[in-house]
């Protein structure tokens, strides 16, 4: 920590224990690791995550929220779609964690199968058939 002499406020330059814990917990789940794997490939909407991983909308959304709350994701709203992407992180902490995860997932056959399914996934407008 360093002391800002003008404001007499302590400014943390390292991640807090809570931030470290939240990030570690977010990456400690198989579904969330699989989602991160998809997001290494490209930006995804919830319906694409559902299709690639064969999971429900509730499960996909819940796990995306956990990753977002832990500081890993950006959310962009594009019409009816909520599009998620990995943050190009401003801090080295998340970046280093994701680099380690990516290094291992690249070698994982199951993770590679998820990418193949992602490439076949179609965006689905809520209440309508998949877009071609």
Image: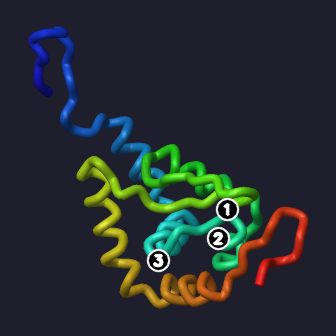
Give residue 88's position: percent from left, percent from top: 35, 58
Displayed quadrant of residue 83: bottom right
Residue 28 in the image, given as x and y percentages of width and height? 46, 59
85 left or right of 59 in image = left
Tag nearer the camera, 3 or 1: 3
Residue position marked by numbered label 2 in the rendering: 49
Is 126 left or right of 6, judged from the image as shown?
A: right
Residue 94, placed above or below residue 18: below
Packing grade of label 2 (10 A; few <14, some 14-19, many >=20) is many
- The residue where tag 1 is placed is 60
Question: Marks 2 and 1, how far apart in space?
Answer: 7 Å
- Badge 3 element: helix
Q: Are marks 2 and 1 in contact (CB under 8 Å)?
A: yes
Whole-angstrom CA distance, mark 2 to mark 3, is: 12 Å
For marks 2 and 3, the one nearer the N-term is 3
Q: Residue at x 37, y 40 (%)?
A: 19
């Amino acid at each position: 920590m360093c002391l800002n002499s003008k404001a007499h406020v302590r400014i943390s330059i390292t991640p807090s224990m809570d931030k470290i814990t939240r990030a570690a917990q977010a990456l400690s789940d198989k579904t969330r690791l699989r989602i991160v794997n998809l997001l290494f490939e490209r930006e995804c909407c919830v319906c694409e995550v559902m299709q690639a991983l064969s999971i429900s909308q509730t499960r996909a959304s819940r796990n995306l929220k956990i990753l977002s709350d832990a500081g890993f994701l950006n959310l962009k709203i594009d019409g009816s779609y909520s599009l998620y992407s990995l943050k190009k992180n401003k801090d080295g902490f998340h970046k280093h964690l994701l680099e380690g995860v990516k290094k291992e997932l690249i070698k994982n056959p199951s993770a590679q199968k998820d990418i193949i399914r992602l490439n076949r996934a179609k965006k689905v407008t809520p209440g309508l058939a998949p877009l071609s």
